[in-house]
Amino acid sequence: MLRIPPAARRRLVALPKPAAARSLHVSRPSPLPRPSAAAHAVAAPAVGSYHPSPDEHVLNSPSEVARRISAKVLPKIARPDVRKVVVVGSGGLSIGQAGEFDYSGSQALKALREEGVEAVLINPNIATWQTSHQLAAEVYFLPITPDYVAYVLEKERPDGILLTFGGQSALNVGIALDRMGVLERLGVQVLGTPIRTLEVSEDRDLFVQALKEIDIPVAQSTAVSSVNDALKAAEKIGYPVILRAAYTLGGLGSGFANDPDELRDLSAKGLSLSPQLLIERSMKGWKELEYEVVRDAADNTIICCNMENFDPLGTHTGDSIVVAPSQTLPDDEYHMLRTAAIKVIRHLGVVGECNIQYALNPWSKEYCVIEVNA
């Protein structure tokens, strides 16, 4: 056995104890993410001293005048009993359903939340404000088609549906769902502009008939559903003619024809996109003007603004420049078209915002209504 002398023992240096194995780095567990609190846009009664009683339904406005008027008007309107509403969203951005529908749809979702109504959104476009998680209770990133919207209605069983915040696609889907009987079977109310008004504004033949009932001028036109009928209608009206396709986005399938050959090609293209065409008298070169109109359920109607196309009729609005307000209208022509706009919107029964487009002869006061986008 090896013996170490005591002197040598004292000279030995004590070795350090082996360090414990270093534990791997582990991140601190983070708490579950919490949704950010929604900021409700509630207007403070900053003007005037009028404060409504708890049982009064008053407009959310800082103006005392607006609160007093709404306290008298709103109780006369039957409020729909809705707790859950499906909002058909803006979808892909294109001519006919552009960014303004994302903005207006976002405001609609905020208003529904302020009223305590659960909002369910259908919108396949993730690059929109309205698909933000704090605006809607549920968001479905699904195409705006009758089948997918019907699926969401079956699953969510809402009390109402809003169609006027999704552009042309949403309007077409709403009309299709009504014809399929889906809305009636599920007991879903159409809030805002009714389906019948949407049908009249989109069906060119019904639209012309409705405006003739109130003596509002429209272009001489004939609704057709075949190439041969289009050629016969053009012979009666006289060339050149303009062809308009119903139920399409941003004038898709529409155009001018100067002779039968051009009309034959144009109508064949239009019928591939829409079941109905409207052959109209050409007003190429006339001024093109628009009025933005808002009407509520109590028949209060206002003109938000009017606009004038930089280019004359013949260049699509999406390819032109629009100036607001109009720059070349004298006062009498402005009020002539303003009065006609209010008359048309009230007759059609629009509830909400809409757009009415005119063609105005620059050498006279002759005008025609082109279309109404409800």
Image (cartoon, rainbow, N blue to C red):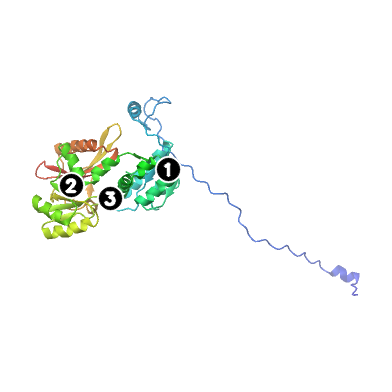
Question: Label 3 vs label 1: CA separation?
Answer: 29 Å
Give the Cα separation between the discs numbered 2 and 3: 17 Å
Whether residue 183 is visible here, answered yes or no, is yes
203 or 8, which is in the foreground?
203
The residue carrying mark 1 is 157
**Quarter of the image containing the N terminus?**
bottom right
User: How dense is the environment of label 1, judged by Cα within 10 Å: few (below 14), some, or many (20 and up)?
Assistant: some
Q: In the picture, which quadrant includes the C terminus?
A: top left
Q: Amino acid at mark 3?
A: Gly
Local packing at callout 2 (Cα closer than 10 Å; few below 14, some 14-19, many 20+) is many
Residue in the picture at 87% in, 69% down: 9
Q: Considering only order in the chain, which callout, 3 or 2, is on the residue closer to the N terminus?
A: 3
Residue type indicated by callout 2: Glu
| Badge 2 vs badge 3, beta-carbon distance below 8 Å | no
Q: Which residue is mark 3?
A: 96
Query: Residue most toward the bottom?
Result: 1
Q: Position of residue 313 (x, y in %)?
A: 16, 50
Q: What amino acid type is highlighted by mark number 1? A: Arg
In terms of sequence position, does the residue under pointer 3 or pointer 1 come before the other? 3
Tag in front: 2 or 3: 3
